[in-house]
Image: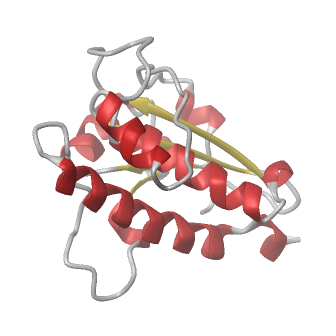
């Protein structure tokens, strides 16, 4: 994480296509992890989509229901990634290769593009997935799988990037 400075919050933006399933779930999970560790001052967490489809909408109702069963309230309003996000965040976490490719297209510089990392980079060793699958056209199992993958990845991300480590 080359752009993070010791003593400053870690700024993370989670990105999927529409910002109504995967990325707001990752945002909610990461906020919960940070809160449980009483570490809110050490993190800036947000999410966005590469598409414009759902700007202003709450997360998908099914994702909110499944997240609520895990004690998470997802209240983020969908927004589209903006060029300024590359200045405002240390790490831009893509849920899959398609979103990473779209992010690289809008990155304003090579340096900005280096901030893009796949969520799968934070999965535990032996994970069966190399991306976070889109649950939009799936049933309950798809949403549960996404939440499981994100719980694992966000927990590992917190352990790796914890600002307390950099102080």
Q: Residue at x 65, y 68 (%)?
A: 161
Nearest the camera: 81 or 141? 141
Residue 51 position (above or below residue 88): above
Q: How many marks?
A: 0
Q: Is residue 84 left or right of residue 116?
A: right
Nearest the camera: 120 or 63? 63
Percent position (x, y) of residue 167? Answer: 89, 71
Q: Residue at x 82, y 58 (%)?
A: 39
Q: Report if residue 80 is visible in the image.
A: yes
User: Quarter-wise, where is residue 33 in the image?
Assistant: bottom right
Q: Residue at x 44, y 71 (%)?
A: 152
Percent position (x, y) of residue 136? Answer: 18, 37
Q: Is residue 158 left or right of residue 132?
A: right
Nearest the camera: 1 or 72? 72
Q: Residue at x 61, y 33 (%)?
A: 87
Q: How is the image coloured?
A: secondary structure
Farthest front residue? Answer: 69
Q: Report if residue 110 is visible in the image.
A: no
């Amino acid at each position: 994480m080359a752009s993070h400075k010791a003593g400053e919050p870690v700024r993370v933006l989670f990105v999927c296509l529409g910002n109504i399933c995967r990325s707001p779930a990752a945002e909610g999970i990461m906020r919960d992890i940070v809160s449980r560790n009483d570490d809110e001052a050490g993190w800036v967490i947000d999410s966005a989509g590469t598409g414009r489809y759902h700007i202003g909408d709450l997360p998908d109702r099914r994702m909110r229901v499944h997240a609520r069963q895990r004690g998470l309230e997802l209240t983020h309003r969908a927004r589209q990634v903006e060029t300024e996000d590359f200045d405002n965040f240390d790490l831009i976490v893509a849920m899959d290769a398609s979103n990473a490719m779209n992010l690289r297209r809008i990155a304003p510089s090579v340096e900005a593009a280096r901030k893009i990392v796949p969520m799968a980079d934070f999965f535990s060793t032996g994970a069966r997935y190399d991306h976070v699958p889109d649950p939009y056209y799936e049933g309950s199992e798809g949403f549960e799988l996404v939440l499981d993958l994100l719980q694992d990845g966000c927990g590992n991300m917190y352990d790796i990037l914890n600002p307390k480590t950099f102080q």
